Image (cartoon, grey):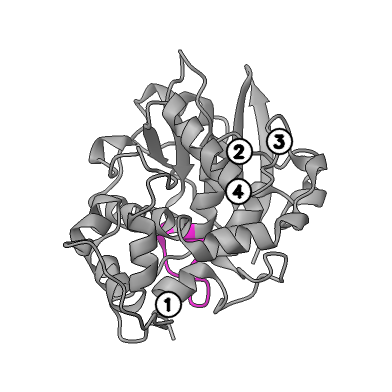
């Protein structure tokens, strides 16, 4: 597994990008690993529709309702959840090379003219999982319990949060400043490790939040089913203003900065985000909630 991260400044615009082997997973397969909540939780009258409304696809929603009803209740009843004002991703958020926001990425990746339907579907699936997981009590506990791993020497302009509540509020604040609107781009690179890029809003000229990925991020690699989703969360935190500043040797693949910290909580090991990144991740929150399908 190989990952590099760099920040570039050009005309006062910071663009971040990451290299990694990446994959996605699908809980509809019979091989799904499950951690089941056996409880008498009272769910909303139509929890499936409620989960779909925040971005999850139908199969993931069914999986969560069956196996994690208390987590579903907690997320749906939380009025302050991250992404609370972000609408379900619309197809018009998936833009191409002709969009004005593509220009700053041009030095690092060739943006394709369009996304195909399967790429949009897979990205939406990953994004929906992120929306759910970062709003669970398990994520909040993991975030607060390991907060001492963060090192303020690498925070850049925006201070690292002292707890999950501050992290949550900063995320929603940043999205509100951009009118809760993202633009997503598909890069045309051929690097088999996969690339991802991100950029915060710079109003009024660049008022949206921007994420660009290469197609490898949406592909499946046995043993690394959750790296795609965790990398996308990494990039989302950059759009909220978080950095891993300084020498890349001190921050790359280290849980001492917010982007990697949250990436490792959901994609590697929630109990110890500083643990070595290895194939198969039973303590990663994406594994806990959605399992894996490539046994």
The local crowd at label 4, few if under 14, some if 14 to 19, many if 20 or more residues have their Cα within 10 Å, is: many
Give the distance between the C-alpha atoms of the residues marked 4 and 2, in whole angstroms: 7 Å
Secondary structure of the residue carrying tag 2 is: strand
N-terminal-most mark, 4 or 3: 4
How far apart are labels 3 and 1 at the CA level?
A: 34 Å
SS of the residue under disc 3? loop
- Magenta residues, dominant SS class: loop
Residue appearing at x 60%, y 68% in the figure: 270
Tell me, yes or no, whether the highlighted magenta stretch contains residue 224.
yes
The image shows residue 186, relative to residue 156, as above or below, that is below
In the picture, the disc for residue 65 is none
Reply yes or no: does residue 16 show up in magenta: no
Give the x, y percent position of residue 146.
70, 61
The region drawn magenta spans 218-229
Q: Pointer 4: what residue?
A: 18
Please tell me which of labels 1 and 2 falls first in the chain: 2
Identify the mark nearer the N-term, 2 or 3.
2
For the residue pair 95 and 131, the one nearer the viewer reads as 131
User: In the shown orientation, is residue 261 left or right of residue 150?
Assistant: left
Residues 251 and 214: in front is: 251
């Amino acid at each position: 597994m190989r990952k590099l991260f760099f920040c570039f400044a050009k005309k006062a615009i910071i663009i971040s990008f990451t290299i990694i082997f990446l994959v996605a997973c699908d809980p509809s397969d019979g091989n799904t690993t499950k951690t089941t909540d056996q409880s008498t939780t009272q769910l909303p009258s139509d929890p499936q529709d409620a989960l779909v409304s925040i971005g999850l696809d139908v199969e993931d929603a069914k999986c969560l309702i069956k196996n994690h009803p208390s987590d579903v209740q907690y997320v749906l009843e939380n009025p302050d959840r991250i992404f609370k004002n972000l609408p379900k991703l619309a197809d018009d958020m998936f833009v191409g090379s002709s969009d004005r926001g593509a220009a700053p990425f041009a030095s690092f990746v060739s943006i394709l003219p369009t996304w195909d339907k399967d790429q949009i579907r897979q990205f939406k699936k990953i994004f929906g999982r992120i929306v759910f997981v970062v709003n669970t009590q398990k994520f909040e506990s993991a975030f607060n319990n390991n907060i001492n791993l963060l090192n303020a020497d690498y925070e850049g302009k925006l201070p690292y949060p002292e707890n999950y509540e501050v992290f949550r509020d900063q995320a929603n604040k940043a999205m509100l400043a951009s009118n809760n609107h993202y633009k997503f781009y598909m890069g045309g690179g051929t690097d088999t490790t996969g690339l991802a890029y991100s950029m915060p809003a710079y109003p009024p000229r660049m008022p949206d939040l921007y994420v660009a990925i290469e197609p490898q991020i949406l592909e499946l690699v046995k043993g690394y089913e959750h790296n795609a989703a965790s990398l996308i969360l990494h990039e989302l935190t950059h759009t909220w203003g978080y950095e891993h500043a300084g020498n890349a040797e001190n921050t790359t693949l280290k849980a001492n900065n917010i982007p990697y910290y949250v990436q490792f909580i959901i994609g590697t090991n929630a109990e110890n985000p500083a643990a070595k990144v290895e194939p198969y991740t039973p303590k990663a929150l994406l594994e806990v909630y959605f399992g894996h399908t490539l046994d």
